[in-house]
Amino acid sequence: MFDGTTSLRFEVGEPANLRLTLTFSGLPLSATGVEDVADLIEGFQLDGEASVFCDRIGFSLVQIGDVVFYRDADTEVSLPRGAYDRLALLVTDLIQDQRVHGAFEEAYRRLARETRAAAWHPSHVEG
């Protein structure tokens, strides 16, 4: 999805791995894995708010004046508030797609199966 200098790319890989890349003026903001992608989506759902603030384990978004600062371990990007709002609209369009809902549901199911299998592995059962 594209809107001027902003773009969004959502990828689904196997085994049920998700990647979301938001790009502003050629600078990518990425998340991989169902939890990190969900956090990034949540961070870009604040376009209706007077000020943007989102602090997660993997990144932070903080608005100072008319600029939203995105920071993660490797990246620091300054986004004009208008660019943030355009990315937020792309994210809103993305999450309304039923195929995206299906990809998240499958990824969460797979994650639950893997977690349960690790917890219930026969080597943990005393006999």
Image: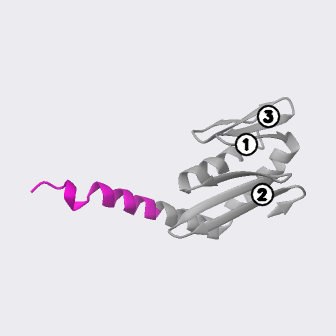
The residue positioned 86% from the left and 51% from the top of the image is 25
Numbered disc 1: secondary structure = loop
Question: Which residues make up the magenta segment?
Answer: 109-127
Left or right for 104, reference 116: right
Earlier residue among tags 2 and 1: 1
Q: Residue at x 74, y 54 (%)?
A: 22
Q: SS at mark 3?
A: loop
Q: Amino acid at mark 1?
A: Leu
| Callout 2: SS | helix
Q: Is residue 125 left or right of residue 70?
A: left
The answer to if 116 sits in the magenta stretch is yes
Quickly name the residue at label 2.
90
> Which residue is tagged 1?
46
Foreground pick, 54 / 36: 36
- Depth-wise, is mark 2 or mark 3 nearer the camera? 2
Q: Are marks 3 and 1 in contact (CB under 8 Å)?
A: no
Picture coordinates of residue 105, whole percent (x, y):
52, 64
Q: Residues within 10 Å of mark 3 (few under 14, many from 20)?
A: few
The three-letter code of the residue at mark 2 reads: Leu
Q: Which image quadrant: the N terminus?
A: bottom right
Outermost front residue: 74
Locate the C terminus by quadrant. bottom left
Query: Residue at label 3?
Result: 50
Per the model, the C-alpha gap separating discs 2 and 1 is 12 Å
